Image (cartoon, coloured by chain):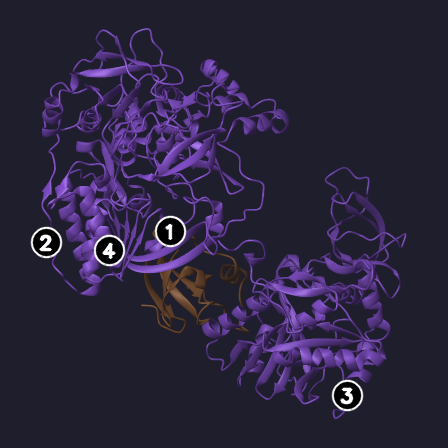
Amino acid sequence: MTQPFRIENGGLINRDKKLSFKFNGKTYFGYEGDTLASALLANGVHLVGRSFKYHRPRGFFGAGVDEPYAVVQLYRNGETEPNIKATEQELFEGLEAKSVNCWPSVNFDIGAINNFLKIFLPAGFYYKTFMWPKSFWYRIYEPFIRKAAGLGVASTKHDKERYEHKYEYCDLLIAGSGPSGLAGAYAAAKNGAKVILAEDKPRFGGSLLTSDVNIGNQSGKDWSEGIIAELKTMPNVVVKNRSQIFGYYDHNMLVMSEKVSDHLPSTKKYHPNKRLWYIRAKEVLISSGSIERPIVFGNNDTPGVMLSSAAKEYLKVYGVLVGRKPLVFTNNDSGYETAIEFKKHGVDPVVLDSRKNPESEIIDEAKNLGINIKNSYVVVAAQGYKKVKSADIASISEDKKHLGKIENIQCDCICVSGFWTPTIHLASQSGNKTKFKEEIDAFVPGQSKQNEITLGAANGVFSLDETLKTSFTAGSELSKKITENDNNIAIPNVVEKKSSQHDKFWCVPLPKGKNYKRFLDFQNDVAVSDVEIALREGYRSIEHVKRYTTLGMATDQGKTSNLNGLQLVSEIENKVVPAVGHTTFRPPYTPVSIGAIVGREVGKHSKPTRKSPMHSWHDKNNAVFVDAGVWLRPRYYKRGNENLFEASKREAKNVRINVGVCDVTTLGKIDIKGPDAAELLNRVYTNAWLKLPVGKARYGVMLREDGIVMDDGTTTRISENHYHMTTTTAQAANVLSHLEYYLQLVWPELNVNVVSTTEQWAGAAIAGPKSRDLLQKLFPNSDVSNEGLPFMGYIEGDLFGVKARIFRISFSGELAYEVNVESDYGNFMWERIIEVGEEFKIQPYGTEALSTLRIEMGHVAGSELDGRTIPFDNALEGLVSKKKDFIGKRSLQRSAFLAEDRQRIVGVVPLDKQTSIPEGSHLVKDDKAPLPNPKLGHISASCWSVEYDNPFSLAILKDGKNMIGQKLFAMSPLKNKVIPVEIVSSHYVDPKGERVRS
Amino acid sequence: MLYINCPHCGMRSQNEFSYGGDASVKRPELNKEVSDQEWDNFVYNRKSLRGKHLELWQHISGCRQWIKVERDTATHEIFRTYKADEEVA
């Protein structure tokens, strides 16, 4: 199949490798090295999409990141991705893409009716129209707008691709591999600096790939290839193509997205799709170049109207003619370069120059080639619907206000050049205060805020000679500071054609009686008239104009539209452009895949998974696991067809009648040592700690300074100056930081060291009436009688040759012990307990049974210590010392904390003794009261009491102390339940606590 | 992302640290009579300063030391860092 618009020779594509691809279902051919855009243009395809609002036909406008039109839906290796710029997507064998924002097809799009309704769709249309009636918003307006809006569809499938993150440090980071970036990189690399050079395109060289210049005795392109080849051999240099530096953050941290696999039919094994680089650079050289800006004229969005630099790039890089009858419309010399390239390939362009009598070497060359040049001429409007067919042109007066007689000339493309806009996004993101440069009608970086310097076209310097000189010097100076090497590099001579001053002209006036749409923002369909409306309606700040009209808000972020928008506002407001100012440049510079930002932290990898040393035993014994913070804990051990409810009931019941064992390794453990350890505990906990004897444990509650309970747990005095603190699983890290805060900053005079030993100890809780008999068999040489090891006692023992710590503490409310051994022996300990426990009918129990046991005993846990309760609320006021001071004590004197009817923990039983009460239910007095029904309290935890065989819940209830015996309703609108309940004591089982002491 | 000079470990990225609030707040001494106003100021009342601010950070993924960082809250410039027990100049 032929590619009718591909020239015979030339371009940087690989003509030996032909690739087939599909666009909107039709098969085409291109070459390796093409982009999807260049391959489509080679096949004469100009219609690629429909515009966002009016559904007008859209073609190609640029050749790179600035492209506003050619956004397609890409299909690759069974996956689909929206919002892909055809100008950036490299061609690969089998590529498939489709147009977006059109239905049923790009050629016949029903939404195009908006184009004929456009007088009804001006700026602010949505804001004004969809205000009323309010009830229409959810059901009618929003679904309608959602369907109409958007460019492409996100996949709903799990993304199979892998994305990586990488952290890197360097001396000099260079954004852009044009002449400035290459010169800076080379000079710095020669001084031994660690350099990273990033280029967003597949090919290095930037403007040197398309400009007609000589450096030294080589063409610009050959020179750039030589420099890159040498840089690649240097160990201190990283050279990356397909890598966009999209964000400049604090303290010289820049983020770069590297497209590792997008140019291949499928991602190679062990390769990521994209790699996100977090780069901390000592110095940054921004050599991001410039983007050509359009001149605004009637129907300037017609397919076939494109930037003149893009037309040149398609020709020189890809060997593609964007038309055979080109019209070049320019206000500066760049348009002539494009015209000369056309002429050299046997195509006769017509040049319209808005300037009256410009003179320069480039223009002379064009004249010598016999190119038809019309001075003081402009394009008034493009004609043609799906493709440019002709242009209405006219002469223009010197003040640029009046048009001469309109003529129509045949053409198949209009290449437009309105001069150049420096790409200052990165500099601005770094905090650089930009300034307006009159000579180029654009903003350039001003005073640097971080260690960054902007050079070349990005700094508004369009002379290659000056760019190379400043960039070689900067690269050398910046690196010299860091490496203290100074290898003087000779700066090569440059041969380039001098250009003349551009014309400060950006918008063609409307001819009398014509009302052409003149577009500023091509992707969001913002025309000159829309901005005029916004200003008429009183929008003044450029940030407001942007949001009201959506100028510059599309995925191209106004790369081709922002400056013309500013020009228009400044003209209507009769202000100079710098007084209007520009909108904020925010990262990312170009769209970044969400997958790349997320990296490897997906699914199971979104947080670390911690497993206890006994995990594999649990796994082998049918444990069903549950996430407890970052830990995986057995929730229950499934037997046969049991469900969660049945299994946990069985496990809990076995603890009440026989003995159970529970993995409590996840509890936070902190080792506390030092002569002032007791004093620290005395200040941290609400109760007294100075007189705790060695070999004893004590339960403690710690507060935050605001009086709210932070955590609870037991701490054991191992020896004179050595304590072992336990915390809840969830608060382990916070409690450690809390202790460190007081020791390092508030009371540095205390001689204490704290260190986390959570991972050093494996723990097993042995609970139930037969636990002592089991313990005696496990530790035959230890005295574990009620006298030898009383409640809250501690001894050390020998577990079949392994040193163990034995604590007589209980969370279940039964006679219970906790045995700790070094983590490596955790599994050994567990297996011995199970083996020896067999004769006592031991069963392992999970967190669900653990909860049941603690709830019916009225022991508080995380669901009551929820960051909103004080000791009184949890019936823990008996643990609050009146004598000594401690963290948070002063706050307990706040009047709300002393209120007579303060909330307090209670037990809740359903009247029917059948219906389980959903956690989170509200307790109310009257279930028929009008909403909002006054809430008296909430259910914090629910279980099925194995002791009484009926549901039981804990609740935090207002005036709970005086509510025992009252009848209330538990309401759960979420579960649609209203349950009549009775309030009882929170200590439902063994209220006197006799079992733990038995 | 900030780049913080831990006085114990050197330059480290912000994601190794955890923020700890205003470093100029002094906890009232234990066992001292404290007025409601004084206690409120200690527990709740903080100035949200624009400009130079002395703040606490803990190097939680490093040496676990609490440090003081003098930082501009508007520009994020870090002027100096101090050890917990170091006098602030």
Q: Dot 3, crowdedness within 10 Å: few (<14), some or many (≥20)? A: many
Which chain is drawn using purple?
A
Q: Amino acid at mark 1?
A: Val
How much space separates mark 4 and mark 3, taking CA atoms? Answer: 75 Å
- The quarter of the picture where residue A418 lies is top left
Please, what secondary structure does the residue beneath circle 4 have?
A: helix
| Earlier residue among tags 2 and 1 | 1
Is there any visible trace of residue A982 in the rendered image?
yes
Circle 4 residue: A231
Which chain is drawn using brown?
B
How much space separates mark 2 and mark 4, taking CA atoms? Answer: 17 Å
Circle 3 residue: A784
Circle 2 residue: A490
- Asked if the residue at tag 1 contacts the one at tag 2, i.e. Cβ–Cβ closer than 8 Å, the answer is no
Q: Nearer the viewer, mark 2 or mark 4?
A: 4
The residue located at (49%, 59%) in the rendering is B41
Q: Nearer the viewer, mark 2 or mark 3?
A: 2
Q: Amino acid at mark 3?
A: Val
| Earlier residue among tags 4 and 1 | 4
